[in-house]
Amino acid sequence: MVLWDKGQDVAAWVQRFTVGEDYRWDTLLLPYDIEGTRAHAAGLVRTGILSDEEFQAISEALDALQAEVQAGRVVVRPEDEDAHTVIETFLTKRLGDVGKKIHTGRSRNDQVLAALRLFLKDGLRKAGRQVARLIEQLCELGARYNDALMPGYTHLQQAMPSTAGLWALGYAELLLSDLAALQHAFEQVNVSPLGSAAGYGVPFLSLPREEVAQRLGFRTVQLHVTAVQLSRGKLELHAVHALVQVSATLNRMASDLVLFNTQEFGFVELPPEFCTGSSIMPQKQNPDVLELVRAGYHRLLAELNVLLTLPANLPSGYHRDLQLTKEATIRCMLSAHDLLMAMVQLLPGLRFRRDRMQAACTPSLLATAEALRRVADGVPFREAYRQAAAALDQLPHPDPQTVLKAYHVDGYPGRGRPDLLRQQLQTFRSWLERSEQSDT
């Protein structure tokens, strides 16, 4: 029986249409909904709805349900409609009238948002830890290949000297910015909706909203209850946008590596266990993992678009349209974790080929250096520019030691500073390693 049942028959197709795939996503939210229910029950003790003994019975029943969920023996089925029904049905069957009290003072509207935000907090921190691992791996590559000369490109044309180390550290620094976005998104969703019910509060009951929020590890509550439903889709957008930023970085990194792995470039060797073969061409080793990482960005972008557009033009309050924001959010989080895991697993086996990179460096890469050498001799830059352009055929083949010796500023080729990036990464450690109990 669904929670809103009033004894009236509903067409089977209406049930199927309104539930859709939601039961699948609610199965993922069950553990979080259970913890939200436990905290709500503690609040009902404070209001006199539940006794201490009843709360103890509910808490023990929720422990049993959590164990069943973790073992895979309890899931949300289409006929259940949602996780909330599963929990209330379990409690009622086990505890009778005590279980029937659990929904006092709440709505499925604030209940699902509490579960979703707990899911997002876990998911954002997990993504942050994965990003931190990538940054560490890229810093290792940056140190190992600091002097490995390679062409730098603009417009896919050779432009100026670079190094494989500089390539890696550029992405590491970009991921530090993405990590800051994840932490900011975490703070945005770290607010409790419980006690707002359907969006207009609860009469007669003085629900201890701040205490319940603290129990669940939220930093605060959304004070004015109308803000809760107005923020639905909007707070999720913070999380998804941060994940899209991460995936955009991975997209370009994967694109580089696919290009560098071609026979024409041959700059990198990919670990063979992360490549696949062809069903007809025996010689093929295809970078499928990287190609799917590259493509994954577009899937996340599609989910972001749902969150950007779906709530637009809706009047205030809850509307069933907003149900679809949950699916978009969860899909994005799960996909982002997969993309990050792919890169975390692949990077340790990545090898740059110094010989191929150096062989690819043409004398034209030194044109800018030649112009600036003439500037040092007193020639105005614009004239030096023209002179260097006219003397391209006189430029030598780049020698790594000579080329890199010309750079004197940190962050330039041969002047990578992975140590400074690691220092920046340390500033995120307290967030990444924090337990839920200390989130308030």
Image (cartoon, grey):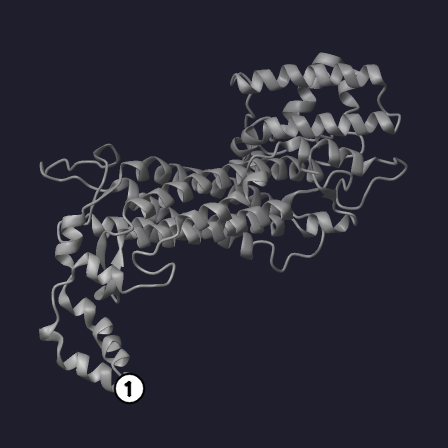
Give whichever of 121, 183 is nearer the camera. 183
Direction from residue 25 to residue 110 in the image, left or right: right
Which residue is found at the position 67% from the left and 31% from the top?
Answer: 437
Residue 364 location, quadrant: bottom left
Q: Quadrant of the C terminus?
A: top right
- Horizontal and vertical percent for residue 14? 58, 37
Direction from residue 177 to residue 357 in the image, left or right: left
Q: Quadrant of the N terminus?
A: top right
- Taking 419 as reference, is 94 above or below it? above
Direction from residue 54 to residue 61 in the image, left or right: left
Give whichever of 150, 108 is nearer the camera. 150
- Horizontal and vertical percent for residue 289? 29, 40
- Taking 69 as reference, is 282 above or below it? below
Which residue is found at the position 71% from the left and 18% from the top?
Answer: 91
Q: Secondary structure at mark 1?
A: loop
Give whichever of 29, 416 is nearer the camera. 416
- Mark 1, Cα crowd under 10 Å, few <14 / some 14-19 / many 20+, is few
- Horizontal and vertical percent for residue 65? 63, 17
Is there any visible trace of residue 79 in the rendered image? yes
Give whichever of 219, 387 is nearer the camera. 387
Direction from residue 268 to residue 201 in the image, left or right: right
Q: Amino acid at mark 1?
A: Pro
Is there any visible trace of residue 152 in the rendered image? no
Which residue is found at the position 29% from the left and 52% from the top?
Answer: 255
- Taking 406 as reference, is 21 above or below it? above
Which residue is found at the position 63% from the left and 46% from the top?
Answer: 187
Question: Residue under circle 1?
Answer: 380
